[in-house]
Amino acid sequence: MSSHADKLPRHIAIIMDGNGRWARQRLLPRFAGHQSGMESVRQVVKKCIEDGIEALTLFAFSSENWRRPAEEVGLLMKLFMTALDREVKKLHKNGVRLRVVGDLAAFPEELQQRIVNAEALTRDNERLALNIAANYGGRWDIVQACQQLALRVKLGSLQVEEINSDLLAAALSLADLPEPDLFIRTGGEERISNFLLWQLAYTELYFTKELWPEFNGESLQRAVASYSQRQRRFGRTSEQVEEAAG
């Protein structure tokens, strides 16, 4: 018999969608939705800590989001910096290790420095690995992994025929964590939008019409309950999975 812990995902990945629509429904500027969404982040982090989830990865800013109006992008950068200033000490106190993954060179130097400081402060924490994907894209992640392997081939420390899926996976962002067990997207859209493309190969997908500022600890509990009812086969038959589980 499997325990309750066996049914919990070790790693949850979330696309936090619907901030702008939430604000528009309330006749508020889009940025108000992003601000309100910060409370949802706090609640989800808290719930993950309570439930003993190992890792949480949040898609905060995709490499495609630069196409948004310049004013909104600027406000998002300010919100990111404010959030780091306000939240990092609380995260550290609660044993959360914070990491920001993506092509960070495009961000203002002031923001880059805050990220470096936050990661350094929380580096040794082990209660929850909180990953913020910012200026991140799944295709970018695979390309940068290929570049790492290509450089090793160029330097002579790796032969082309030695390259396999394990080596490529080890060069990706978040390679030190288990791949996501559960992917959640709020806001009603049902696509993965260039998020963790390699890592989501066998992930259970959960879509909800709840807009991100409406999503809370109870919402996460419903998603995890849905996950716990599913049988993960990884290419095997149901009979093989049941036999292995005893």
Image: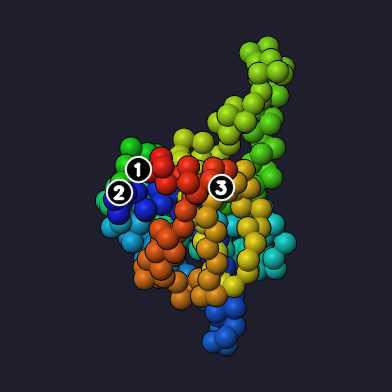
The mark found on residue 1 in the picture is: 2
Asked if residue 201 shows in the view, the reply is yes
* Image quarter (top left, top right, bottom left or bottom right) of the C terminus: top left
Q: Nearer the viewer, mark 2 or mark 3?
A: 2
10 Å crowding of disc 1: few (<14), some (14-19), many (20+): few
Of residues 71 and 87, the one drawn nearer to the viewer in this rendering: 87
Disc 1 marks a residue whose amino acid type is: Gly
Q: First in sequence, mark 1 or 3: give its number.
A: 3
Q: Secondary structure at mark 1?
A: loop
Q: First in sequence, mark 2 or 1: give its number.
A: 2
Please tell me in which quadrant of the rendered image residue 69 appears.
bottom right
* Residue that mark 1 sits on: 246
10 Å crowding of disc 2: few (<14), some (14-19), many (20+): few
Where residue 105 appears, as percent x and y from the top left, is 62, 43
Of residues 154 and 93, the one drawn nearer to the viewer in this rendering: 154
Disc 2 marks a residue whose amino acid type is: Met
Disc 3 marks a residue whose amino acid type is: Tyr
So how many labels did they put on this image? 3
* Residue that mark 3 sits on: 202
Residue at position x 38%, y 43% from top? 245
Above or below, comparing residue 95 to residue 120 in the picture:
below
Residue at position x 61%, y 63% from top? 74
Query: Mark 2 touching mark 3, by CB under 8 A?
Result: no
Where residue 139 appears, as percent x and y from the top left, is 69, 45
